[in-house]
Amino acid sequence: MLTSDDKTLIDQARFLSQQARDPAPHYEHSTIGYNYRMSNIVAAIGRGQLRVLDDRVESKRRIFAYYQEKLGNVSGIKFMPEAPYGISNRWLTVILITPEEFGADRETVRIALESKNIEARPVWKPMHLQPVFKNNRCIGGEVAEDLFNRGLCLPSGTAMTEEDLDRVIEAILGCKR
């Protein structure tokens, strides 16, 4: 869903979301577009989800706060900060692990969690490291690579209990040397 009070932006977004087809009797494209139109079924589900949005955000923020309370003072673990200009929905809890301080790297922690049937994933692999872009030139990328190498996305489903969170935390702390 996209909302704005700027008609020009809305018209441009709608144009791009409908494959950026130019107004011609044949298919002609002067701009690369996408097919991001939403079906009526998906729109109905989205509207229904809006009713519980505040509850979900509250749960996500609670989960983040719990992880931060239990792991925030652990040497070698840092949490992604909240921007000073807004309030994060904390959709995903991400930690950065500094192996020299923590005693284990991100992948060791991820595998330890996996061995306990706890799913955790590295932060998204940067686009410039994706195989499809291997022949493209990259300028910079050090920050993205650092986040990928040290970042771990922790389980943060809204149905998680404190017992579930404690199980994740215990597994992480079990990796500390």
Image: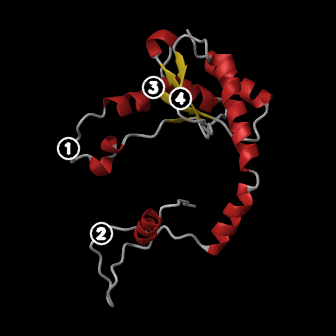
Give how far apart the Cα atoms at labels 1 and 2 are: 23 Å
In the rendered structure, which disc, 1 or 4, sits on the residue that comes first in sequence? 4
Q: Which residue is mark 3?
A: 150
Q: Nearer the viewer, residue 131 or 75?
A: 75
Question: In the rendered image, which residue does mark 2 sit on?
Answer: 31
Q: Are marks 2 and 4 in contact (CB under 8 Å)?
A: no
Q: Residue at (75%, 31%) from the top-left corner?
A: 164
The disc, 2 or 3, on the residue closer to the chain's N-terminal end is 2
**Marks 2 and 3, how far apart at CA:** 37 Å
Q: Residues within 10 Å of mark 4 (few under 14, many from 20)?
A: few
Viewer can see residue 174: no
Q: Report crowding for label 3: few under 14, some 14 to 19, many 20 or more residues within 10 A (C-alpha).
A: many
Depth check: 35 or 52 in front? Answer: 52
Type of amino acid at the residue the image marks with label 1 = Arg
| Foreground of the two, 17 or 8 | 8
Q: Nearer the viewer, mark 2 or mark 3?
A: 2
Three-letter code, disc 3: Arg
State the CA–CA distance, disc 2 to disc 4. Answer: 36 Å
Q: Position of residue 21 (x, y in %)?
A: 36, 77
Nearer-N-terminus badge (1/3): 1
- Dot 1 or dot 2: first in sequence order is 2
Residue type beneath disc 4: Pro
Classed neighbour count for the residue bearing mark 2: other residues with Cα under 10 Å, few (<14), some (14–19), many (≥20)? few
Which is more foreground, mark 1 or mark 4? 4
Q: Is residue 140 above or below residue 67?
A: below
User: Percent position (x, y) of residue 22?
Assistant: 33, 79
Mark 3 or mark 4: name the one nearer the start of the chain. 4
Residue 137 circle label: 1
Please, what secondary structure does the residue beneath circle 3 have?
helix
Circle 2 or circle 4, nearest the eye: 4
Q: Which mark is drawn over residue 84?
A: 4
